[in-house]
């Protein structure tokens, strides 16, 4: 499954200036999904060309703009969104009548994120995320960002699938 820039902007919850995905070039899912554990191994690949006009750069080393490390993690998390979005589209009917209806994925924790090289404006990034484990309502995801075939950051993070309305009332 692929999503072009227009579709990404439509479906990704984050909007400019906090949308860090230009397009999703591939989502790979298992052939058969009978339970949440069946999505282990699912992956997404996305691209993002770092926009030099993003206001983040006005305050983060303005003389030599560098993308903040926390945004590296956000980019990986946004890439993983497309795995769950695609699953939701495939199982739309089943989800309508499940306890997952109305739930959203939120970043729960960052684990062992490594920043190997800085990310500068105008760099074209390739982002790959893979679901490594599912337990209860939490997914452990491995992410990697590369530029010109070289890894610039990588690590693992957890996404919790929760009802924001119920959690924050």
Image: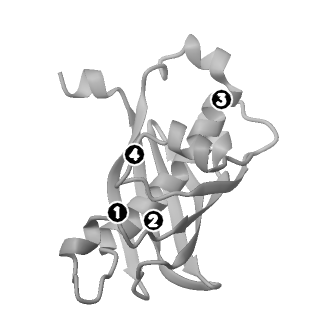
Determine which residue is flagged by label 4.
14
Q: Give residue 99's position: percent from left, percent from top.
A: 47, 18
Callout 3 crowding tier (Cα within 10 Å): few <14, some 14–19, many ≥20? few
Rendered-image quadrant of the C terminus: top left
Left or right, residue 73 beside residue 93: left
Quote the CA–CA distance across marks 3 and 2.
Answer: 25 Å
Indicate which disc, 3 or 2, sits on the residue closer to the N terminus: 3
Quote the CA–CA distance across marks 1 and 3.
Answer: 27 Å
Q: Give residue 136's position: percent from left, percent from top.
A: 46, 36
In the rendered image, the vertical position of residue 47 relative to residue 69, given as above or below: above
In the rendered image, the vertical position of residue 77 relative to residue 30, given as above or below: below
Determine which residue is flagged by label 1.
110
Q: Secondary structure at mark 4?
A: loop
Q: Residue at x 82, y 41 (%)?
A: 31
Question: Label for residue 156?
Answer: 2
The mark lying in front, picked from 3 and 4, is 4
Q: Secondary structure at mark 3?
A: helix
Rendered-image quadrant of the N terminus: top right
Quote the CA–CA distance across marks 4 and 1.
Answer: 19 Å
Dots 3, 4 in contact, CB < 8 A: no
Q: Quadrant location of residue 25?
A: bottom right
Question: Label for residue 165?
Answer: none
Dots 3, 2 in contact, CB < 8 A: no
Q: Secondary structure at mark 1?
A: strand
Q: Residue at x 45, y 59 (%)?
A: 20
The mark lying in front, picked from 4 and 1, is 4
Determine which residue is flagged by label 3.
89
């Amino acid at each position: 499954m692929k999503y072009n820039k227009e579709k990404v902007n439509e479906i990704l919850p984050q909007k400019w200036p906090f949308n860090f995905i230009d397009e999703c070039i591939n989502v790979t899912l298992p052939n058969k999904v009978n339970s949440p554990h069946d999505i282990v191994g699912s992956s997404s690949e996305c691209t993002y060309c770092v926009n030099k006009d993003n206001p983040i750069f006005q305050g983060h080393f303005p003389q030599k703009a560098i993308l903040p490390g926390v945004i590296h993690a956000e980019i990986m998390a946004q890439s993983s969104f497309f795995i769950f979005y695609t699953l939701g589209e495939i199982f739309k009917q089943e989800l309508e009548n499940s306890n997952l209806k109305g739930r959203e994925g939120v970043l729960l924790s960052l684990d062992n994120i490594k920043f190997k090289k800085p990310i500068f404006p105008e760099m074209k990034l390739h982002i790959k995320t893979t679901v490594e484990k599912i337990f209860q309502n939490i997914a452990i995801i491995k992410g990697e960002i590369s530029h010109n075939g070289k890894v610039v950051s990588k690590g693992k993070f957890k996404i919790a699938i929760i009802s924001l309305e119920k959690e924050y009332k």
